[in-house]
Image: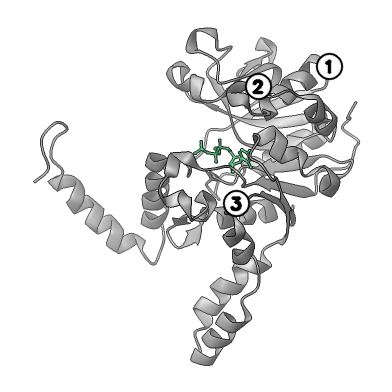
Amino acid sequence: MSNPTSRPARKAVIPVAGMGTRFLPATKAVPKELLPVVDRPALQYIVEEAARAGLPEVLMVTGRNKAAIEDFFDRTPELEAALEKKGDAGRLAAVQESTDVAQVHFVRQGEARGLGHAVLQAAAFVGDEPFAVLLGDDLIDARDHLLEQMLAVQAEHGGSVIALLDVGMENIDKYGAVAIDPASSGGDVVAVTGLVEKPPVAEAPSSLAIIGRYVLAPEIFDVLRETAPGRGNEIQLTDALATLVERGEPVHGVVFGGRRYDTGDKLDYLKAVIRLAAERDDLGPSLRGWLREFVTELPAEGASPS
Ligand code: UTP
């Protein structure tokens, strides 16, 4: 059993091998993780988050049609030389930052057989220590220190830690849902007593949904090897975590109250772009002015736009 004295997590795994069907047709040729949020791919924010949390060793689990991701995190000597020649220091720094932020490694999933299967591809890279998983389409605002808090909870309690968001009962059937020990409810750290992937609303154990950050004990790999395909015929990480709980391994949840965007979902993606751009020093003033005007001109819901 993992215990609080085991080594703290040092490595991050980012699965990016999913098909991105919700964002078709854009994702026919562009991985959804590279869709720009203002001027950077969603994935760059996520790699930066891992580095900020003290996890500079990153493994991306990629698949077919995802070669552009490897290119993005590679050096671009010709582009850098051209920017240097032009004296464009600002853009040169932006280009270099995107590759220098972390040591990025890649492994292929081969076939998109589910998030659990994607995580299993990281077993050799991770070895026998706890590790973080950050979903490549789940953006957490840089001002909210969710991953840091999860790493601290894992260091204190051992076992595994998952990020939770109260999405309301009416939305829980789109997520993995958890049951928690009532004695631990109320605070933002809860003891998880059960997990189920996308339950019907009437059967959901709570309105707490699993979102895309995990700090996992290495025991998850043995469990994943034995986990049969579940919901959607995919090997589900939620099912493997449920097995860990059944075996008495500690699984804690950190209930998140900050800003989070699912950039694989069209509406959430648009919200992320608008909000982050509106808060930037360079774009914010002009965008906010335009947004105010735009909103006053919006027709009432149901009326046809002019
Ligand atoms: P999603 O279910 O959001 O990804 O998986 P998806 O399947 O690409 O999305 P849609 O529903 O078809 O639009 C969450 C994360 O897990 C990765 C995805 O890339 C995403 O970052 N994933 C999912 C894998 O790496 N492999 C898989 O087999 C499935």
Q: Amino acid at mark 3?
A: Ile
Which one is earlier in the sequence, the residue at label 1 or at label 2?
2
Q: Amino acid at mark 1?
A: Arg
Q: Which residue is mark 1?
A: 247
Residue drawn at the location 42% of the way across and 53% of the way down: 276
What is the x, y in percent for residue 152? 75, 39
| Residue 162 falls in image quadrant | top right
What is the secondary structure assignment of the residue under circle 1?
loop
Residue drawn at the location 54% of the way across and 8% of the way down: 203
What is the x, y in percent for residue 129? 86, 41
Q: In the visual, does 55 lie left or right of 49? A: right
Query: How many marks overall?
Result: 3
What is the secondary structure assignment of the residue under circle 2?
loop
Q: Nearer the viewer, residue 235 or 75?
A: 235
Q: Does residue 194 appear in the picture of this structure?
A: yes
Q: In the visual, does 226 lie left or right of 260? A: right
What is the x, y in percent for residue 177? 59, 20
- Spot the residue most to the bottom: 85
Image disc number at residue 46: 3
Rounded to the nearest whole Å, what is the CA distance between mark 1 and mark 2? 19 Å
Query: Relative to residue 224, is residue 56 depicted above or below?
Result: below
Q: Amino acid at mark 2?
A: Gly
Residue drawn at the location 54% of the way across and 51% of the way down: 33
The local crowd at label 3, few if under 14, some if 14 to 19, many if 20 or more residues have their Cα within 10 Å, is many
Q: Which residue is mark 2?
A: 230
Do the numbered discs 2 and 3 sit on residues whose CB atoms are within 8 Å? no
Foreground: disc 1 or disc 2: 2
